[in-house]
Amino acid sequence: MPRVQGVDIPNNKAAYISLTYLYGIGRHTAIEICRSLGLDPQMKARDMSDDDLAHLNNLLDTSYVIEGQLRRQVQQHIARLREIQCYRGSRHRRGLPVRGQRTITNARTRKGVRKTVAGKKGVKDMRH
């Protein structure tokens, strides 16, 4: 498995698909990278030479924010929103959707597994 920016990319997939295993690189960016380096996007990752991998690592270092650096940057942006106590920051703090989605029925991804709360007893149940 070739190693790019500290991540093992799969051998038997096309180069542009293998590049998407890096955090912060999608298909469009991967194809763009292959074209700028003069690589065939359909070439298997195992067929890339050491020279190609060195050029790839160099390009990713200089031109793109990916992996740990990008994760850190995203966390800093969220921390800033929390710190200035804006609406989006408070939604992040509470673990609710940030971009205006409804929360009465959906939003299970952000809210987590349902926590059932026991309902109140009705008036009829109180008589007996």
Image (cartoon, rainbow, N blue to C red):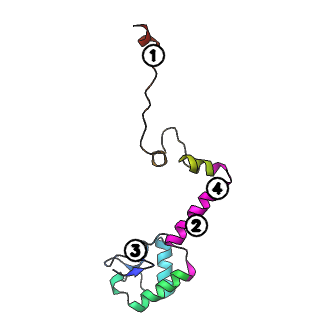
Quadrant of the snapshot with the C terminus: top left
Q: Nearer the viewer, mark 3 or mark 1?
A: 1
Q: CA separation, marks 2 and 1?
A: 52 Å
- For the point 45% across and 16% down, the residue is 122
Q: Secondary structure at mark 3?
A: helix
The residue range painted magenta reads: 62-88
Q: Is label 1 in a helix, a strand or a loop?
A: loop
Q: Nearer the viewer, mark 4 or mark 1?
A: 4
Q: Amino acid at mark 1?
A: Gly
- Residue that mark 4 sits on: 81
Q: Is residue 80 above or below residue 107?
A: below
Gap between marks 4 and 1, in whole Å? 43 Å
Q: Are marks 3 and 2 in contact (CB under 8 Å)?
A: no
Q: Which residue is mark 3?
A: 17
How crowded pointer 2 is (Cα within 10 Å; few <14, some 14-19, many 20+) is rated as few
Is 63 included in the stretch rendered in magenta? yes
| Nearest-to-viewer mark from 4 and 3 | 4
Q: Is residue 92 above or below residue 18?
A: above
45 or 113, which lies in front? 113
